[in-house]
Amino acid sequence: MPPSHEQSATPVISKTNWFWTLLALSIPMVGLAFCLYWFFSQNTNPTKRNFAAAALLWAIILFVLNIIFAIMTIHFFSHMSSDFNSFFFDQQNQPVEGSPV
């Protein structure tokens, strides 16, 4: 026989608790610490634990995307600067004939 609804129900998290939860998560390093605590703590409400797991998953995804974007940006600007210099200067670092420099 499956457990009844009252036996498996977890306490409802109040709006005030969610307000303070979201406020704590909006502070950069404090939010990460709270997320880790809520995710690994055994006495955390399961709803808040699931929320912390989802927030940590998003943080990991966004961190990886930021690293990829940073690498692409550095790669783009490094090639752009070498093309820019070759347009204005020859290999001996002298201005090219007809360049505005």
Image (cartoon, rainbow, N blue to C red):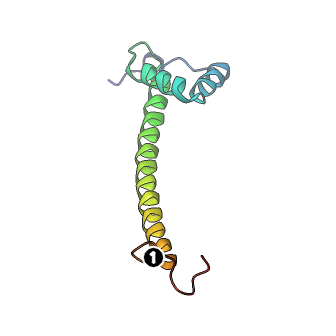
Q: Quadrant of residue 42?
A: top left
Q: Residue at x 50, y 73 (%)?
A: 84
Q: Residue at x 42, y 38 (%)?
A: 57
Q: How many marks?
A: 1
Q: Nearer the viewer, residue 38 or 66?
A: 66
Q: Residue furthest bottom?
A: 98
Rendered-image quadrant of the C terminus? bottom right
Q: Position of residue 50 (x, y in %)?
A: 45, 30
Q: Residue at x 50, y 82 (%)?
A: 96
Q: Quadrant of residue 26?
A: top right
Please say if 11 is above or below 64: above
> At numbered mark 1, what does the secondary structure look like: helix, strand or loop?
helix
Please say if 58 is above or below 28: below
What amino acid does circle 1 point to? Ser
Instruction: Classify mark 1: residues with Cα within 10 Å, few (<14), some (14-19) or many (20+).
Output: some
Q: Which residue is mark 1?
A: 86
Q: Nearer the viewer, residue 84 or 42?
A: 84
Q: Left of 16 or right of it: where is 28?
A: left
Q: Position of residue 36 (x, y in %)?
A: 42, 24
Q: Residue furthest left?
A: 1
Q: Position of residue 7 (x, y in %)?
A: 43, 16
